[in-house]
Amino acid sequence: MPSAPCPTPKIMISLQNIEKVYRTSTIETLALNNINLDIKKGEFVSIMGPSGCGKSTLLNVMGLLDEPSSGTVQLDGQPVMKYTDKELAKLRNQKIGFIFQSFHLINDLTVLDNVEIPLLYRSTNGKPRQEYAKEALAKVGLSNRMKHFPKQLSGGQKQRVAIARAIVGNPDIILADEPTGNLDSAMGNEIMTILQDLNKEGATIVMVTHDEQMAKRTHRLIRLFDGTQVL
């Protein structure tokens, strides 16, 4: 008896004919040019290219932080081009976790309070919110740093806090912009291992990187040059 065909993976992010143009009174810059790209559920994809080629702009369009000048964006099967800012913010909060190169932690808040921030926008009550944050910190190996402040942490520890904040709401998608860029090779490898573990647990991850070795640890590589996809 023939085996049943494998189901087609769900498309989590779909970009069609995306262009992004930045205009001033004197100049027009084409940041993204005719990008057509699908990211499947469970993929770990890296984006590479020279500085200024549109990598971060592409990630921002995927994350609904930046609106394309033309083209269509779908997130988890939902066309979002006609969404209001409030609807986009809600969808981001529910579906996407962001990791930034410079961590973006709030120095006046403890590690635990920093990780809880995305749940505040979901109106999650205090006790459950704290428990979810503790679970996220345990996943990245920082249960013993919950009451510390960012200034008391190393760069690698700060990035692990940023990852905990990104995953505390259990998002389907993680978008990481140079997550190992400010770290030494040992810490960078630790962060990549955490991301790979999250991917194995089901998260769809898109990562911008300049590091070929880190890119080789992902499922698929996308290369950009002058805003155009070349691979």
Image (cartoon, rainbow, N blue to C red):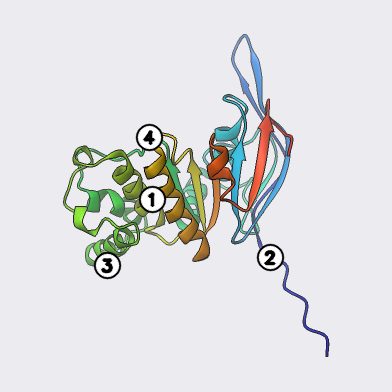
Tell me where residue 70 appears, x and y as whole percent.
70, 35
Question: Answer yes or no: do the residues labelled 2 and 3 have beta carbons within 8 Å?
Answer: no
Disc number lying in front (2 or 3): 2
Residue at mark 2: 9
C-alpha gap between disc 4 and disc 2:
33 Å
Amino acid type indicated by mark 4: Ser
Disc on the earlier residue, 1 or 2: 2
In primary-sequence order, the first of circles 2 and 3 is 2
Q: Which residue is mark 1?
A: 163
Q: How many marks?
A: 4
Q: Relative to the observer, which residue lies in front, 111 or 128?
A: 111
Q: Residues within 10 Å of mark 4 (few under 14, many from 20)?
A: some
State the SS at label 1. Answer: helix
Does dot 4 land on a helix, a strand or a loop? loop
Residue 128, which numbered label? 3
- Residue projecting furthest to the top: 26
Query: Is disc 1 surrounded by few (<14), some (14 to 19) or many (20+) residues within 10 Å?
Result: many
Q: Is there CB contact under 8 Å for labels 1 and 3?
A: no
Pointer 3 local density, CA inside 10 Å: few below 14, some 14–19, many at least 20 = few
- Local secondary structure at mark 3: helix
Rendered residue at 42%/43% (across/down): 188
Q: Quadrant of the C terminus?
A: top right
Q: Position of residue 51 (x, y in %)?
A: 57, 25
Q: Which residue is mark 4?
A: 102
Which label's residue is closer to the chain start, 1 or 3? Answer: 3
